[in-house]
Amino acid sequence: MPVRYYEGPMRPLLVVFAGGASGPWRIQRIDAVIGESLPITERLAMLEGEGTRHPAEADWVLRGVTSNERYVNEAERAALTTRQAGLDRPEATCAALIPIRKSQTWWELTQEARREIFEERSRHIATSLQYLPAVARRLHHGRDLGEPFDFLTWFEYAPAYREAFEELVGKLRETEEWTYVEREVDIRLIRDGHP
Ligand code: HEM
């Protein structure tokens, strides 16, 4: 098994999210935050690795790869590495899959201009760090795969942390970074066998 909690300099991992009748995650709700939603379905499976195939019975399938970081500086990387928790903690029975697409305007900016908006003006990392290690995360990139979403963001947390996670999502959606988001779907999930 690859080490999954640190998404820095590691080999890209292909991850397929399949919504349908099977999978260990029960879908609680699917909300269209910006733009078009995804069809409602019952369950979600997260399949990892190159050999992964689209499950034939899935209602929808989204793909992404983990990648190198684009924006993180050295101090931020150190802070993230010290604080972040891994996926699959037994107590983290809640999850969020939030697929996001940013606008053409965003992608036409230079890397420096994007960093400026992402961190210096929107404080994405500084704000989010306060919610670690309670929230575990993994970022998947879909843009270069020709996927409908540029990013598939995945989070796992314990039920007691639900409200705090809502607060974080609310703060991020108020930022300048989010003015470049043209499609966002918010999918909330509960691991099988949990209330
Ligand atoms: C749980 C705490 C969180 C932490 C510590 C965190 C941290 C980060 C970091 C470090 C990056 C930059 C990766 C890079 O350098 O390429 C990033 C990117 C991103 N995060 Fe978060 N994040 C958190 C929560 C969230 C939430 C709740 C959302 C969605 C509502 C989100 C959406 C994104 C997106 C879409 C990107 C990609 C941005 C881009 O490359 O343009 N993050 N996050």
Image (cartoon, rainbow, N blue to C red):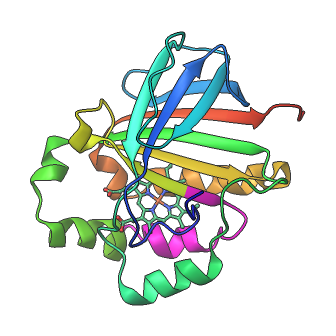
Q: Which residues are magenta?
A: 122-137
The image quadrant where one finds the N terminus is bottom right
Q: Is residue 94 visible?
A: yes
- In magenta stretch: residue 166: no
Position of residue 83 measured from the top left corner of the image (x, y, whole percent): 64, 78
Position of residue 149 measured from the top left corner of the image (x, y, whole percent): 33, 35
Q: Nearer the viewer, residue 185 or 173?
A: 185
Q: Residue at x 31, y 48 (%)?
A: 179
Using residue 157 as the reference point, say whether residue 17 is left or right of it.
Answer: left
Position of residue 41 measured from the top left corner of the image (x, y, whole percent): 61, 14
Using residue 66 as the reference point, say whether residue 171 is left or right of it.
Answer: right
Q: Nearer the viewer, residue 47 or 125?
A: 47
Q: Nearer the viewer, residue 90 or 153?
A: 90
Q: Residue at x 31, y 71 (%)?
A: 71
Using residue 24 as the reference point, say whether residue 103 is left or right of it.
Answer: left
- Eyeballing the image, is 98 above or below 68? above
